[in-house]
Image (cartoon, rainbow, N blue to C red):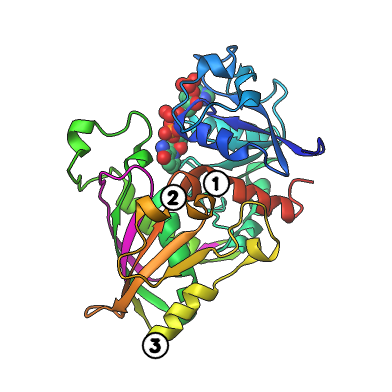
Amino acid sequence: MNDERIPVGVLGATGMVGQHFVKFLLNHPWFDLTWAGASDRSAGKLYREATSWRLDGVMPEKAAALTVRDGQPGNGAPRLMFSAMDASVATEIEQAFALAGHVVVSNSRNHRMEPDVPLLVPEVNPDHLKIIPQQQRRRGWKGQIATNPNCSTVVLAMALAPLRQFGITRIVVTTLQAISGAGYPGVASMDINANVIPFIGGEEEKMQQETQKILGDVTPDGFRPLAAKVSAHCNRVPVVDGHTVTVSVELSNKPGEAEMIEAFSSFRSVPQDRKLPSAPPNPLIYMQDKDRPQPRRDAERERGMAVFVGRLRPCPVFDYKFIALGHNTIRGAAGAAVLNAELMYSEGMLD
Ligand SMILES: NC(=O)c1ccc[n+]([C@@H]2O[C@H](COP(=O)([O-])OP(=O)(O)OC[C@H]3O[C@@H](n4cnc5c(N)ncnc54)[C@H](OP(=O)(O)O)[C@@H]3O)[C@@H](O)[C@H]2O)c1
């Protein structure tokens, strides 16, 4: 590993998503994890003492030896900071880092819907980074904040991206969301075992609004959300990793089935053109088998960074229905944020 990599920090490094960042950044070709931040409860301890490692495999040795810092700028924090902090504290702390000149690439929900903050999916709306100069002017920041979507939204937005050419007018989506999306300890085993919980607080609203923002347009002055109506039904199911969404979509241009499958299969975008290190070669993988994709068999493929689509068929109410699946803690959290930072680096925004 060359030592000219860019030093990066993780705010909220001891939490569930923070641990995914630590794991995902291990051996990253461009980024070197040199800094870990968490609450005052953890500050001053070694990462190995402050963290109950909950992921498969062992805690990476380099992270284990870092001294955890508190959530304030200074303390040798590098310019590029990933954020996986508890939502109750993320607003103020992320803003303090942006004010102090840091590039904050956040996984928290706090700034996602702000009118001057990009809600990025590099394959879908890389141009939304255009809003950053306005953000810096308006807020007087030398630094900046960019966000990634909610873990179920990213699966939907990726699957819909190649259908924009057909004129999306209405979307109804039902989710089957994995328990890892609820963090640790998450949903009680007595509630989720052999059961379905048809409620995830705030999730349906997030999915509806975030999808419209991501698939909408940007000008240097602001965002114009996609005009399509989105209706989401969100459910927690007894799956460990991998959010499945079933989608019915209405399209004004009435494409044929072969055109739809070709649109999914041939979809490529900026991260693939630029060969960003975390970009899957094929961001959408259309599966022909009638019973795929499935979370246990497919979510981890392509390092958890691709979205799998299948079962395209006519919808008697709208035009088409299909299924999509993505890894919620990788493509829906840490991997998404790291790909965002790679895009920003490739745009010269980390120079
Ligand atoms: N879980 C998921 O799959 C998932 C998916 C998408 C998005 N998210 C979002 O990601 C964020 C983190 O979720 P999580 O499940 O990882 O939560 P978590 O396990 O509870 O971790 C929260 C992290 O925030 C830190 N923290 C708390 N108060 C702090 C403060 N005052 N200053 C600095 N750091 C502080 C905690 O440090 P201590 O260890 O010191 O308390 C810990 O590192 C949330 O905003 C959540 O909505 C989660």
Say which of 342 and 210 sits in front. 342
Question: What is the C-alpha distance between the residues marked 2 and 1?
Answer: 9 Å
Image check: 254 left or right of 306?
Answer: left
Q: Position of residue 59 (x, y in %)?
A: 55, 26
Q: Residue at position x 60%, y 45% from top?
A: 338
User: Marks 3 and 2: CB-CB under 8 Å?
Assistant: no
Q: Residue at position x 66%, y 26% from top?
A: 35
What amino acid is labelled 2 in the image?
A: His
Q: Position of residue 162 (x, y in %)?
A: 49, 73
Residue 8 highlighted magenta (yes or no): no
Q: Is residue 86 visible?
A: no
Residue at image mark 3? 256
Q: Is residue 202 visible?
A: yes
Q: Is residue 40 above or below residue 127?
A: above
Which mark is first along the chain, 1 or 3?
3
Q: Quadrant of residue 38?
A: top right
Magenta stretch in the rendered image:
223-248
User: Marks 2 and 1: CB-CB under 8 Å?
Assistant: yes
Q: Position of residue 111 (x, y in %)?
A: 50, 44
Question: What is the C-alpha distance between the residues marked 3 and 2?
Answer: 29 Å
What amino acid is labelled 3 in the image?
A: Gly
Looking at the rendered structure, the secondary structure element under dot 3 is: loop
Residue at image mark 1? 335
Looking at the rendered structure, the secondary structure element under dot 1 is: helix
Looking at the rendered structure, the secondary structure element under dot 2 is: loop
Q: Residue at position x 42%, y 52% from top?
A: 299
What amino acid is labelled 1 in the image?
A: Gly
